[in-house]
């Protein structure tokens, strides 16, 4: 999709870039993985755009767990075993 192309959804203007930037911010070099092996970004955008409720899609890239929602991309941090829920 070309920059500035209007979109009919509430998803990020460039979900792919947001996912890559999130992975890089957590220490994963962009040349160390193939994102398409973990997730189909176009299908993910379509899923988010077509949902009427809260949707969260989780997947892992090179050991980094991500959660993608209408609000963006977040890293899921493992809690230590036995950690109390608060």
Image (cartoon, rainbow, N blue to C red):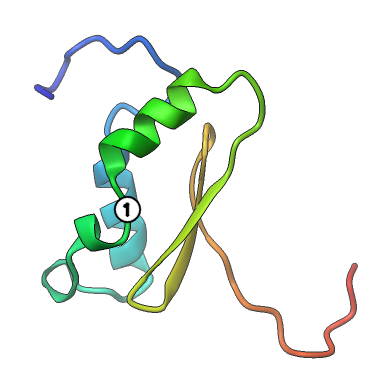
Instruction: Please indicate whether residue 79 sits to the left or right of residue 51 in the image.
Output: right
Residue 28, position in %: x, y?
Answer: 27, 74
Above or below, comparing residue 61 to residue 81 in the picture: above
Instruction: Please indicate whether residue 21 sits to the left or right of residue 26 in the image.
Output: left
Residue located 24% across and 45% down the image = 17
Q: Residue furthest bottom?
A: 81
Instruction: Please indicate whether residue 22 sits to the left or right of residue 54 in the image.
Output: left
Residue 22, position in %: x, y?
Answer: 36, 58
Residue located 23% across and 62% down the image = 37
Above or below, comparing residue 55 to residue 81 in the picture: above
Residue located 36% across and 31% down the image = 45
Residue placed under numbered mark 1 in the picture: 39
Question: Around disc 1, counting alpha carbons within 10 Å, would you say few (fewer than 14), some (14 to 19), or many (20 or more)?
Answer: some
The C terminus lies in quadrant: bottom right
The N terminus lies in quadrant: top left
Residue 73, position in %: x, y?
Answer: 46, 48
Residue 13, position in %: x, y?
Answer: 30, 26
Foreground of the two, 48 or 79 = 48
Count of numbered tags: 1
Above or below, comparing residue 77 to residue 81 in the picture: above
Residue 35 sits in quarter: bottom left
Residue located 52% across and 32% down the image = 70
The kind of secondary structure element at disc 1 is: loop
């Amino acid at each position: 999709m070309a920059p500035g192309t209007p979109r009919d959804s509430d998803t990020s203007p460039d979900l792919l870039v947001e996912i890559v930037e999130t992975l890089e911010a957590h220490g994963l070099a962009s040349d160390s993985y193939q994102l398409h092996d973990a997730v189909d970004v176009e299908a993910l955008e379509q899923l988010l755009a077509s949902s009427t409720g809260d949707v969260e899609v989780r997947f892992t890239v090179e050991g980094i767990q991500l959660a993608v929602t209408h609000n963006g991309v977040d890293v899921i941090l493992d809690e230590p075993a036995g950690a109390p829920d608060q």
